[in-house]
Amino acid sequence: MKISLEETIKLLQQLIRVPSLSREEKNCADFLSDYFDRKRIALQRIHNNLLLKNRHFDPQKENILLNSHLDTVRANENWTVDPFDPVIREGKISGLGSNDAGASLVSLLNVFMHFYDLQDLNYNLIFLASAEEEISGIQGVTSVLPHLEPISFGIVGEPTGMHLAIAEKGLMVLDCKVRGISGHAARNEGNNAIYMAIKDIEWIREHKFPDRSELLGDVKMTVTKINAGTQHNVIPDECSFVVDVRSTDVYPNEQILEIIKQNLSGDVIARSTRLQSSSIHVDHILVKAALSLGISLFGSDTLSDQALMPFPTAKIGPGDSSRSHTADEFILADEIRDGIGIYIKLLDKLLKEDQKKVIPKIR
């Protein structure tokens, strides 16, 4: 039940036309459900997540998960074209979610369909179109995990230029608050919380964690929001700011949080510590298959759903991460074509060739 490149690109255009912000993926999930129904492919829907299995699924075999996400961030105000009108010009498909991660989603779907009817494969294939990836929401991958067959390993579709990310940074979002004393701005009174917060923010900007990850580099901390004051003539007694922390395999989120708390003067509360850095061993069968095809390896600065998956995963997909979350986001049709070709070659090695598996069956 293979689908053509033309149908794959058309499907991407149709998906772009259906707004699918995080937590608002229902219409997009409905559209894809109808698409699979027309193909007479059975699916399991969990919230707005869609699960499919290859036709000759064998419960005695191990399972490979193919995953990418349905949801997008909001279009920012700098778009110069309609983010929901995916016109193709000179091979470029513009639109919200085209690069992150619509191209990976439809490319992996094309590959799933390529192998869907085949028998005597080394593994089963499970395809997951997931929701709430951009916010790591509880009704995304987390809600699907209890319903999954045991997964041996997964391929997560994100824009990597079809290089294989064998590690990615984790994420913590910190809400920080400094408390001062209010007073009249005309007099020398009070204790300005903004001035107090400046010292904490300066520490965030300048601090370097001593140990550096071989694959992921340094832990990165960035102040992304700040709020203080009620009116011009009142000394602010509170200043709050948000810190985006990208962790590595060298420092668990909990350790980073304690170090930050010890060095800031105000309150520091982590919204969550669950999004740890993740990685797959270089001797894993998936990585070896990629290397045999000349696919290069790297460590990724950006987070994906693999942070929530309790089994080995690697990230690879068409497009460029630098285009994600930007105005006039786009993907090239040639990138989709080439991505499908590389995915198929990679899975041919895993599904058809006789090779020793280095990861035991998970039960």
Image: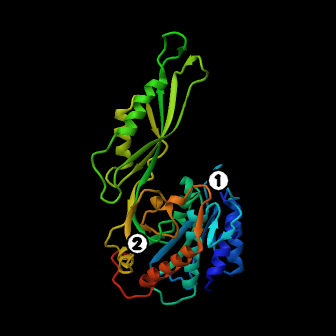
* Horizontal side, residue 334 vs residue 246: left or right: right
Disc 1 to disc 2: CB gap under 8 Å: no
* Residue situated furthest left in the rendering: 210
* Residue highlighted by disc 1: 75
Residue 275 visible in image: yes
**Which label sits on residue 238?**
none
Residue 156 placement (x, y as % from top left): 49, 68
* Residue situated furthest top in the rendering: 187
* Residue situated furthest front in the rendering: 90
* Horizontal side, residue 329 vs residue 157: left or right: right
Looking at the picture, does residue 125 appear above or below residue 29? below
* Residue drawn where x is 47% and y is 86% of the image: 121
- The color scheme shown is rainbow
Looking at the picture, does residue 315 appear above or below residue 8? above
In which quadrant of the rendered view does residue 167 lie?
A: bottom left
Looking at the picture, does residue 205 appear above or below residue 139? above
